[in-house]
Amino acid sequence: MLRLALAVAAAPTLACLMPPDDDVVQWYDDFEACEDLCGWSTTGAVTRTTTYHPGEHGLALAPGASARHPLSIARQAPNQDWQEDFSDGNWVELTTDCAGPGALDLRLVGDDLYAIELTLDQRGLERFSPHRLTFPPLPPDRPASFESIEVTAGALPCRIDNLQVRLSKGRLVY
């Protein structure tokens, strides 16, 4: 009985997204920090809403709506050491009720400066599930900086939660 009580007491703690400590998670938003959209600029109908249970929140995007958040992330250029010329390991993770992860693109907005653009899947709606979208290839010998992330809904209304930008910063850190 004591084990069950401890497991139930620990469950809410395990559900929280912890601050990044692995040097790969560069930015995240679990939509729990405040009651509004906390730094997100929007076009169309975008609201903070509950997701898969009343204590969990995310963004709800109406068809065609978009939400943009500024970023300040720098990915270092790898050196030529065999352990540091690894150029993948850069991706976005999220949970969503859209059928699939959608599409991820990087738009060049300046010298080695990119905007991350995520278009949500429009094939249908399903239960909330995690998805990972890998970045398109980045030049392996150059630094890269990321100034924003923008999420756009397609033809369906979608909800997202636990949005993360993960970068290996050019290093094999796994």
Image (tube, grey):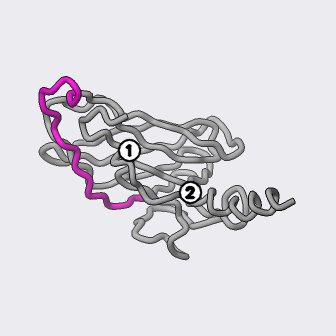
Task: In the displayed orientation, state which residue is furthest to the front.
Answer: 2
In which quadrant of the rendered view does residue 155 lie?
Answer: top right
**Where residue 18 sits: x, y (%)?**
50, 58
Look at label 1 and name its amino acid.
Arg
**Where residue 164 sits: x, y (%)?**
44, 50
**Where residue 102 sits: x, y (%)?**
51, 37
Measure the C-alpha gap from mark 1 to mark 2: 23 Å
Residue 107 versus residue 17 in the image, above or below = above
Span highlighted in magenta in the image: 67-85
Q: Name the residue at 54% across, 44% down.
A: 154
What residue is disc 1 on? 166
Residue 89 versus residue 45 in the image, above or below = above
SS for tag 2? strand
Look at label 2 and name its amino acid.
Leu
Q: Are marks 1 and 2 in contact (CB under 8 Å)?
A: no
Given residues 106 and 19, the one toward you in this image is 19
Neighbours of disc 2 within 10 Å: few (<14), some (14-19), many (20+): many
SS for tag 1? strand
